[in-house]
Image: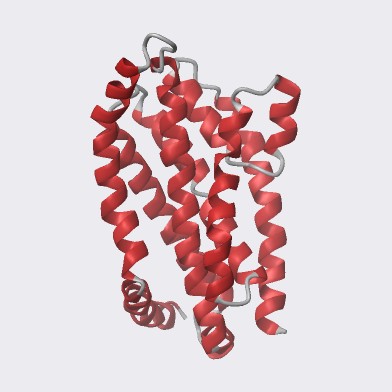
Amino acid sequence: MTAHVIKAMRVLVPNDMRLIWRDGFFLGFIMFVLPLACLGLRWLVPYVDDLVAVWVDLEPYYGLILASALVAGQPVLLGFVIGMLFIEERDEGTLLALQASPLSLRRFLGYRLLTAMGLNVVLTSVGVLLAGLVSLSLLELLAAAALASLTVPLVALVYAVYIKNKVQALMLLKPLQIWGTLPTLLYFAPTPWQWLGSLPAPLYYPMRLFWSAAEGQAEWWLILPGLMIYAAALLWLLRRFERTVYA
């Protein structure tokens, strides 16, 4: 069985690269434009800080700025790209054909989603290091990026389950990005509203872990409720996804 799975993976990996390359705009944006933008933030944010220093000091909010741009923004965009792949494969019958494959649908999902999550951790971590606006340990950075990476399968599965075609997928991108910025607003909300707002916006937990670490007081306990909310949402979406494929 292992040999069959490895053989199937040799086919799937190049096929995924071909599909993503065909929509090269999104691949180029995530892999090249975003890292360059992060490098630009190293100079842009302090420059803006100097301009508005008379009215407000932005330095205490550097962690919040990076959390909004990277910890939240990166997995939302990557989840969108993976969701587009699922829509295309669903329309072409590729997902249904996995029933006759030794890989199986669940193993295929594991490969696809875990690979995307790993890529998100790398890209987010590199982006934060390029920006150089905050000081936190590598463990704190990886923990926040790893927790945020659960957003990738969340977004991808929402697309695969509920979106009918690529036109609808593109129309949903802007509301999706707005959803990703909701935890930024919760930063300024009173405590009870922060927890209520985190239920529909689990990105709040990795973002808060990141900005608390940037402030020198990492709130590690946030990992547990964050994992619980993500797990509940993902399990429900996975069941819906399997029903959609086998319907």
Residue 116 placement (x, y as % from top left)? 43, 59
Residue at the image point whose x is 56% and y is 81% from the top: 90
Residue at x 46%, y 22% (from the top left corner): 213
Relative to residue 130, is residue 239 depicted above or below? below
Q: Quadrant of residue 47?
A: top left
Q: How many marks?
A: 0
- The answer to which quarter of the image holds residue 199 is top right
Q: Residue at x 33, y 63 (%)?
A: 27
Horizontal relation, residue 152 to residue 31: left or right:
right
Q: Position of residue 217 (x, y in %)?
A: 49, 16
Q: Is residue 228 left or right of residue 1?
A: right
Picture coordinates of residue 222, whole percent (x, y): 60, 30
**Colour scheme of the picture:** secondary structure
* Residue 104: x %, y % from top left: 55, 79
The one nearer the camera, 99 or 173, is 173
In percent of the image, x 65 and y 42: which residue is there? 201
Q: Is residue 25 left or right of residue 4?
A: left
For residue 154, above or below residue 169: above
Picture quadrant where residue 21 is located: bottom left
Quadrant for the C terminus in the image: bottom right
68 w.r.t. 232: above or below: above
In the rendered image of this protein, does residue 73 appear above or below residue 64? below
